[in-house]
Image (cartoon, rainbow, N blue to C red):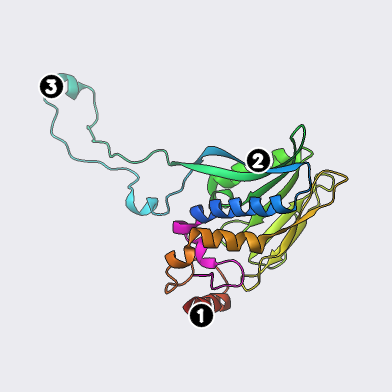
Amino acid sequence: MKCPFPGMDPYLEDPAFWADFHHEFIGALRHQIRIVLPTGYEARLDERIALVEADPPDAKEVLADVAVLRVDEPSSPTQASIGGPLIQPVSVPLFTDEEIREVWIEIRRRPDRQLVTVVEVLSPTNKTGTGRWEYRAKRRALARQSVHLVEIDLLVGGDRLAVAQTLPKADYYAFVSRSKRRPLGDVYGWMVRQEFPRIPIPLAAPDRDVLVDLQGAFVAAFERGDYGALIDYEQPPPALLAEADLQWAAEKAAR
């Protein structure tokens, strides 16, 4: 089954599908970049395993702050002389670290394999909680290098990237930061009812930008993941869209 939407499928924001789609899309995007890269460049996947502090949404509902239980009187003078009642501990998760796999695309120039551009596709861990602060630190580190940075945000939920002024109204964004133009960067925004745009990927001077087909990458990833057969389109989409767009999405999904 093909995607029922002209561009991004808002049902893919469901945590049940996002992690798998994220990997499929990055692979498909790398392929689209490879198609247009000039001779002398390569596009490779890189990754790291990171521990991010998770914030269980139901923690406050199921965990007590303190639990005091009645216990029998101490059976020995030694216990009694210590002072204070004995209480039984309650076992709770004191550490909520979650292991995540971060994957991104690196564009390098041969023969020395110099890093030219980093392409990131944001995940929920980049946009919420401590993971957001860790990603911001990574962005700052890249900004201090002569490396271009392209960031693609296909998630309506979570915090947007911090910028110095209000972003143009859109559901999805691509941010292009060129090493010689910082702190200025280019922002591309589009709505859920629109197709994906083509976006520029900057290369090393004097080579010109290449235009990458995000729509082609999405279609390939959607078909490879067989999401059309897996998603329950009878349910409302999980993405936090405007009310009119939620109704439109439900109608498109029902066809």
Q: Where residue 185 sits: x, y (%)? A: 78, 53
Give the residue displayed 71% in from the left and 53% down from the top.
35
Front-most of residues 75 and 116: 116
Kind of residue at disc 2: Ala
Instruction: Give the residues in magenta.
Output: 1-18
Q: Which residue is the site of mark 3?
A: 76
Quarter of the image holding residue 142?
Answer: top right
Q: Is residue 12 left or right of residue 204?
A: left
- Dot 3 lies on which element? loop
Q: Label 1's element?
A: helix
How many marks the image carries: the answer is 3
Disc 3 and disc 1: Cα gap in Å?
A: 73 Å
Mark 3 near mark 1, Cβ–Cβ under 8 Å? no
Q: Is residue 49 above or below residue 209?
A: above
Q: Who comes first in sequence, dot 3 or dot 1?
A: 3
Toward the right, the furthest residue is 206
Examine the rendering and report whether any part of residue 165 can be seen.
no
* Residues marked 2 and 3 touching at CB (< 8 Å): no
The image quadrant of residue 235 is bottom left
- Alpha carbons under labels 2 and 3: distance apart: 56 Å
Q: Report the disc number at residue 251.
A: 1
Residue under label 2, please give it.
137
In the rendered image, residue 5 lying in the magenta stretch gets the answer yes
Q: Looking at the image, which is closer to me, 158 or 6?
A: 6
The location of residue 120, given as percent across then percent down, is: 65, 49
The foreground one among 159 and 139 is 139
**Callout in the foreground (2, 3):** 2
The span from disc 2 to disc 1 (Cα, nearest Å) is: 41 Å
Residue 131: say if magenta.
no
Question: What is the crowding at mark 3: few (fewer than 14 residues within 10 Å), some, or many (at least 20)?
Answer: few
